[in-house]
Amino acid sequence: MEQNEPFRSANVSDTVQIEEMTLSEDPRPRRASIGARRNPAAEAAIVAAARDLLGEVGFAGFSIDAVARRAGAGKPTIYRWWPSRTDLLVAVYERERAARLAEPETGALKGDLAAHARALFSAWRETPAGHALRGIVAEAQGAEPALVLLWGHLLPALARPIRAMLGDAARRGEVDPADTEMLAELVSGFLLRRLLTGQIDDDRAAIERMSRILATGRGRAK
Amino acid sequence: MEQNEPFRSANVSDTVQIEEMTLSEDPRPRRASIGARRNPAAEAAIVAAARDLLGEVGFAGFSIDAVARRAGAGKPTIYRWWPSRTDLLVAVYERERAARLAEPETGALKGDLAAHARALFSAWRETPAGHALRGIVAEAQGAEPALVLLWGHLLPALARPIRAMLGDAARRGEVDPADTEMLAELVSGFLLRRLLTGQIDDDRAAIERMSRILATGRGRAK
DNA sequence: GCACGATCGATACGATCCGTAACGGTCGTT
DNA sequence: AACGACCGTTACGGATCGTATCGATCGTGC
């Protein structure tokens, strides 16, 4: 879904600043070592290859071998910097996710939650971040380090903006401060369940309902 | 994670009387064919081996080869009846889950939800059903058939008793009937997120909080 | 200047697993 | 009595993982 122009390779743009267009299939650039230090071009090419691969075939076709082939890199180079497949997935996930940050400036909790959920679903749909997170969750079901990383780092990061919204709402008196933690868990549970079942389309009705139930309670339902 | 309980003895319950040809010192019991029909002993031995393997090493060490070795069965026999690894996981999951059905207390929604969540966590802890479901979810992130099975069959089955409780509550006027669907999704999201992150210990406080928020709303917080 | 050493890509290895094929043997069904 | 679906064994091709080895590259420290 991204850039596909088979640009005629002019130069390699070797400086530290790496553009993300260094991924085409050139004859044999043979990106060699640049000395006793990490080659930023290799790092960028590997992450870009992993990202594109995830975007094209999803987690199903994601393998270190395939990434190495696509990036024109050696597997030892990948394993040197990302000790496991999970780490590479995390690198892709965090790089893609960093670009999209939702602003919770709405004022009412319900609107904040809905906007955030819609923005997150959109990011998961339109970047490989969704596939990356799905893969990480999958690996966490069989590998202990991935599980620790998931619920010690990634899920807290996922819940952080939600918790921030809930904190604001608590300060405004919209919710009981004692409930914010569980409310954040319920929201992230909703998001995660939708992601893992492939239901991240822009279902505004469902998002609206979720936000209303969790933001305003439902005791006084219509 | 991996708090492997010695869940049950390795007895192959129901179905058919099985001689102890699985663990004895005999070199090769060689359970042969019984003619042009399915051998219940083979089926029971395979499912039992899969269940025990899940209970001992979790989804990480679960493979068809390992199950075949343990069951003294041939891989073709397994693939004949369970066309994919996912199907075998489902067989284990549904067999273990069938034993434990929580009865709704028919009192108030909050208590029903809490009791059900606690019973489910308990079953996931003390039988391999939790490991099986985690494996199915993991495979659903990379295989389309598993995904279809998960959210077309398993998750609806998981949500069914919850939806029933919510239906009762709606008839009692406790919740708006229009909210039952999303409430069921939120509850199952809570359960699933806890399972996938290995947090299915008997956290009564959290379960209580979840039940209170979803059952009674939280607009009138203390 | 110069040896050291970490890096690069290429290749290969052992191990594991998947899903299927071929085969001889078993035994109800027809 | 022939048929055919079943069983377990063995084996295969393909894919993947993670690691080892190698020659070449080129900053860094002496």
Image (spheres, coloured by chain):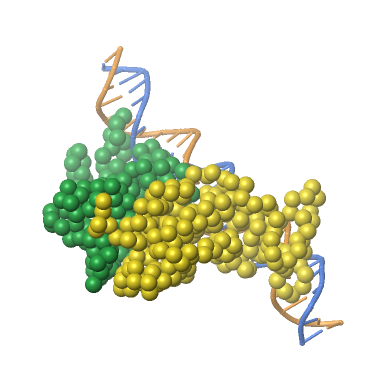
Chain colours: A green, B yellow, C blue, D orange
Residue at 57% from the left image edge and 67% from the top image edge: B83
- Residue at position x 26%, y 39% in the image: A40
- x, y percentage for residue B156? 44, 69
The residue at 47%/58% (across/down) is B115
Q: Quadrant of residue C18?
A: bottom right
Residue A112 x %, y %: 18, 57
Q: Is residue B195 visible?
A: yes
Q: Quadrant of residue A199?
A: bottom left
Is residue B108 or residue A145 the one in the foreground?
B108
User: Is residue A24 visible in this depiction of the protein?
Assistant: no
**Is residue B13 toward the left or the right of residue B34 in the image?**
left
Looking at the picture, does residue A90 appear above or below residue B35?
above
Residue plotted at (19% across, 54% down): A174
Is residue B170 left or right of A8 when viewed as pictured? right
Res A190 → quadrant: bottom left
Q: Is residue A148 left or right of residue B218?
A: right
Residue A68 horizontal/vertical position (percent): 38, 48
Residue A95 x/y as whole percent: 26, 48
Numbered marks: total? 0
Between residue B132 and residue B95, name the one nearer to us.
B95
